[in-house]
Image: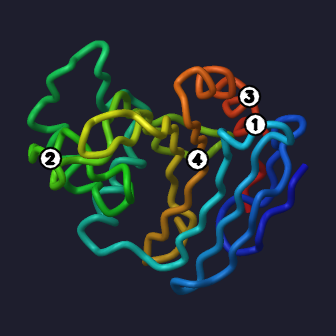
Amino acid sequence: MLKTKTRGAVKKISLPERFVVDRRVDGGMGDNWESCFHPLDQSGVSIFLYYRGRPISGEDAEAFRSLLERQPHEIFSLSSAPFPSAAAVTLFLQLAEALGNAGNNQLINREGGIRGPRFFLEQAETFDLRGRRVLCVRGHFHGPDREPHNYFCGIFFDSATYDKDCRVEELILQAETESLFDQYYPLFRQSIETIEWS
């Protein structure tokens, strides 16, 4: 079981077998840290643990915490409702900072070309993970040509629920191809079920 940094909500997590440390970065933008892991024989897929350290802004923090206080539910699914409701669009506008790079998605950015969204959102839901409510977002990143280059599942949560400031922490699976993502996604889900919270 991997012991993580003392800052943030993830105390320990068991990574899939044969995953090794790729890099660890401490600091750089405030009190943040990042750890990246990949399979010993495959660099095209990674699991990241990322603690942002600095709080997100007031309105975005309020929207994120309010979402996590509601009962677990599906927020958006491309397969069941390809056209988002007005409420979902409003919510994703409010969550843009909390979602980081995944916040620039097709629901809220209707521009084309180079100014268009960099993330294609396929699914978003909240669920309880070992006693803590989390937001899970799935999709893929792409360039201006809309060609996918990074398949993504991000688990977002408030690392300091006891604090007045909301600090987002993330657990991420990223893969260069859809087939790699499909291969490692079940292992990622098994891994997050081993989390011990601080």
Q: CA distance from mark 3 to mark 4?
A: 12 Å
The answer to whether residue 101 is above or below residue 138 is below
- Closer to the observer: label 4 or label 1? 4
**Residue 187: image tag:** 3
Residue drawn at point x = 48 percent, y = 40 percent: 150
- Closer to the observer: label 4 or label 2? 2
**Could you tell me residue 142's position as x and y percent?**
35, 41
Q: Are marks 1 and 3 in contact (CB under 8 Å)?
A: yes
Write down the residue under mark 1: 191
Tell me if 138 is positioned left or right of 47 in this view: left
> For the residue labelled by badge 1, is the local secondary structure a helix, a strand or a loop?
helix
Residue drawn at point x = 31 percent, y = 45 percent: 143
Badge 2 amino acid:
Gly
Write down the residue under mark 4: 172
Q: CA distance from mark 1 to mark 3?
A: 6 Å
Tell me if 63 is positioned left or right of 179 in this view: left
Comes first in the chain, label 4 or label 2? 2
Badge 3 amino acid:
Leu
**Could you tell me residue 42's position as x and y percent?**
76, 37
Comes first in the chain, label 4 or label 1? 4
Q: CA distance from mark 3 to mark 2?
A: 35 Å
**Could you tell me residue 83's position as x and y percent?**
14, 23
